[in-house]
């Protein structure tokens, strides 16, 4: 099933898809084991950094093999594609979904490049995601606010033909210094202004009830990345303290298990 068709199905059911980034075999295994145990579909996400680290063809092959091996319904998505060239490479590599992130560009430039990506993706029949508004990335100030307006969202979707839209409603990438306050009235208004599938970036650290409410109000995709890296690394650090074991097959499993349990919980929120 195409991802855009799955979005339509889960939105009608009042649910959302969890989109999890993976960085190596261990994090891939963890999220897929969680999806299998939860009997839930899952989006596997790759950023440029992860693609550079693992290699494009290798990363896609790992994702495809993992989905097949664990028997999980899933899709492979380019997260925060920063250039049309990278999007084209991922389309040719067989991605099910691509994101062009022009959110830091002027509105008109974001429209022009996103529309170009939409046209480029048509022969591949894949889902195209874009971002509108300011969702602070790692290292950027979360104090700056440029939230998505319903009017801009409607105009952007109509001008570009994009399938999915990541909206700025108060989240940020990375860790929060204080509990994020999501603008639910704004989300509700955006949902009524456009039929695009709405995406929540910066899902790591958002309170459970806020995620549930966001899904209830129309979010179809919730991104989780930072919490995966954090859970895996902190658990591994604890495992290696005063541990003479050198066999990676023995030191990695506790970290895999911790991420699996994290994702099982996140899946329960969106379903």
Image: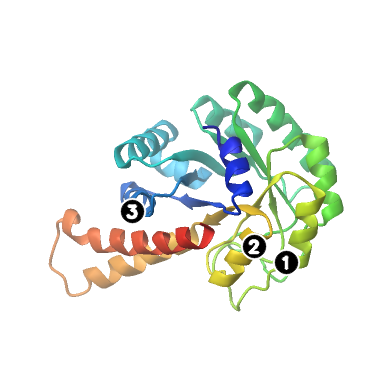
Q: Which residue bears the numbered disc 2? A: 214
Q: Secondary structure at mark 2?
A: helix
- In depth, the one of 228 and 127 nearer the eye is 127
Labels 1 & 2 near each other (Cβ < 8 A):
yes
Rounded to the nearest angstrom, the CA distance separating label 2 from label 3 is: 24 Å
Q: How is the image coloured?
A: rainbow
Q: Which residue bears the numbered disc 1? A: 184
Q: Is residue 184 above or below residue 155?
A: below
Q: Position of residue 33 (x, y in %)?
A: 32, 51
- The crowding category of the residue bearing disc 1, from other C-alpha atoms within 10 Å (few below 14, some 14 to 19, many at least 20), is some
Rounded to the nearest angstrom, the CA distance separating label 1 from label 2 is: 7 Å
Rounded to the nearest angstrom, the CA distance separating label 1 from label 3 is: 31 Å
Q: Which residue bears the numbered disc 3? A: 37
Q: Position of residue 35 (x, y in %)?
A: 39, 51
**Is 138 left, or right, of 257 in this rendering?**
right
Q: Residue at x 64, y 62 (%)?
A: 214
Query: In the image, which disc is placed on residue 215?
Result: none
């Amino acid at each position: 099933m195409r991802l855009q068709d799955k979005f339509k199905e889960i939105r009608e059911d009042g649910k959302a898809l969890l989109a999890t980034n993976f960085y190596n075999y261990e994090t891939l295994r963890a999220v897929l084991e969680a999806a299998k145990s939860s009997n839930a579909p899952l989006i596997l996400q790759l950023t440029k950094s992860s693609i550079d680290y693992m290699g494009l063809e290798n990363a896609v092959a790992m994702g495809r093999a993992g989905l097949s091996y664990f028997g999980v319904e899933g899709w492979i998505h380019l997260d925060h594609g920063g250039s049309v060239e990278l999007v084209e490479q991922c389309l040719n590599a067989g991605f099910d979904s691509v994101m062009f992130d022009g959110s830091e560009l002027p509105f008109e430039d974001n429209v022009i490049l996103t529309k170009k990506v939409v046209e480029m993706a048509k022969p591949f029949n894949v889902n195209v995601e874009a971002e509108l508004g300011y969702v602070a990335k790692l290292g950027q100030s979360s104090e700056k606010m440029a939230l998505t307006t319903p009017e801009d969202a409607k105009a952007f979707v109509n001008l570009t033909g994009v399938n999915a839209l990541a909206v700025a409603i108060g989240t940020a990438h990375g860790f929060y210094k204080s509990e994020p306050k999501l603008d639910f009235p704004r989300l509700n208004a955006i949902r009524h202004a456009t039929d695009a599938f709405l995406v929540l970036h910066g899902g790591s650290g958002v309170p459970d009830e806020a995620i549930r409410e966001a899904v209830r109000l129309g979010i179809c995709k919730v991104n989780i990345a930072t919490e995966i890296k954090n859970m895996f690394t902190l658990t591994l650090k604890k495992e290696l303290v005063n541990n003479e074991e050198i066999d990676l097959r023995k030191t990695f499993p506790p970290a895999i298990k911790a991420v699996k349990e994290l994702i099982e919980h996140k899946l329960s929120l969106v379903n």
